Image (tube, rainbow, N blue to C red):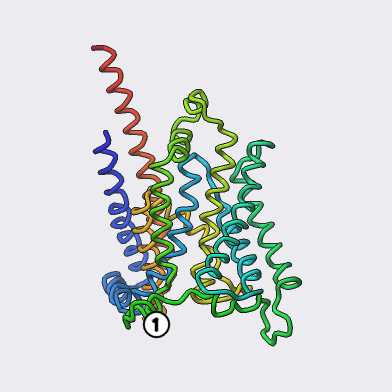
Amino acid sequence: MKIRFRLVSVSAPIIALTVSFGLSSLILLTIGKDPYETFKIMFEYGIRGKSIVSIVNRSIPLYISAIAVAVGFKMGLFNIGVEGQYLMGSLIAAYIGAQFSVITPLHVLFIIIVAVATSSLWAAIAGYLKVEKGIHEVISTIMLNYIGTGLIAYSLTTIFDEPNSNYDLPRTKELPETGKMPPLNKFFNIEDLQDLHGFLVIAVLVGIFYYWLVWKTTLGFDLRITGSNPIAAKFSGINPKRLVVIAMITSGAFAGLVGLAPLLGYFHRFTIDFPTGLGFAGIGVALLGRNHPFGMAVGALLFAFLQRSAQILDLNDVPKEIEQMMQAFILLIVVVFYEVIRRFLVKQQIKDASKRTDE
């Protein structure tokens, strides 16, 4: 049974990608575009040196966002609030981090801690509402996204906006040099890594920590057993209410890291046009990667590749929205495929159990 499940986990994304290309080709044909030439242009543009660096940079926040979502998924929680959580964490971290200057390692570490703490507290609200008021986390996290967006807009324009700035858009003060994370090229002196975010190292460590937390610790075991069978978990002595709050706080902690790659590596401040949508994109990456750190890494790179390679399409008179359609097709097919296979495996387990009982 385990072998079957692993084969399904590997084959599902491949099948989804193949079918997605097929459906996208049909759409391209209906608008008079050559699918072969379109995908060839995308591929050739996507494997250029600068494109590869851009793809890796884009995949970093997508990967961390997927991990934040996956922590909730492991317990059967649907944390849609990663979007608001990472934006709140990035705003507070950018504002506080710009107020002082110390040596770079300590300054960057402090900014990370502030972002993680802020996002954890914001996520804890949803956990509290679920266990104390019975409000489903989907509803509460969606509402918290809207509340967070409003608070960010108000705070950025009235409280955190840089004083005496000639810049039209609201923004916080720029982080001092000690609060900026240098690109990897500074450490390895490789020309091709000139713009590669140093936060890539943090993302790798986050993936390793996530794997250790979920598969190698008691907390991770409790999360997985509760997500697979809440009733059995309750009778085994697990406190489900306590675990819900812990899971939401942990998910929020990971979410706090989502916005730090662009903050520390590129923007160096929080602005009204700070990258958004990373929280929602992370849901898709987590579903595609089956909540596994390696699978989510592949999913993040795939989505980043599609986003980057689609930039060349407008110059070739092809609507770049085809990339968004491909992502949607991939997710839809993967979700449906996994659900069909899950039901099939459940039926097989029931049949196997019946045979053993008859014997």
Q: Residue furthest bottom?
A: 166
Q: Is residue 50 left or right of residue 91?
A: left
Q: Residue furthest right?
A: 158
Q: Position of residue 296 (x, y in %)?
A: 38, 55
Q: Residue furthest top?
A: 358
Q: Position of residue 231 (x, y in %)?
A: 50, 26
Residue at 33%, 63% in the rendered image: 26
Mark 1: few, some, or many residues within 10 Å (few <14, many ≥20)?
few
Query: Quadrant of residue 347 in the image?
Result: top left
Q: Quadrant of the C terminus?
A: top left
Q: Nearer the viewer, residue 262 or 19?
A: 262
Name the residue carrying label 1: 315
Q: Is residue 106 left or right of residue 321?
A: right
**Number of numbered labels in the structure image:** 1
Q: Position of residue 186 (x, y in %)?
A: 39, 80
Q: Nearer the viewer, residue 237 or 178?
A: 178
Residue at 48%, 74% in the rendered image: 181
Residue at 61%, 72% in the rendered image: 270
Q: Nearer the viewer, residue 5 or 174?
A: 174
Q: Secondary structure at mark 1?
A: helix
Q: Quadrant of the N terminus?
A: top left
Query: Quadrant of residue 358 in the image?
Result: top left
Q: Disc 1 residue type? A: Leu
Query: Quadrant of residue 313 in the image?
Result: bottom left
Q: Position of residue 199 (x, y in %)?
A: 44, 68
Q: Is residue 77 left or right of residue 297?
A: right
Whether residue 350 is situated above or below residue 161 in the rendered picture: above
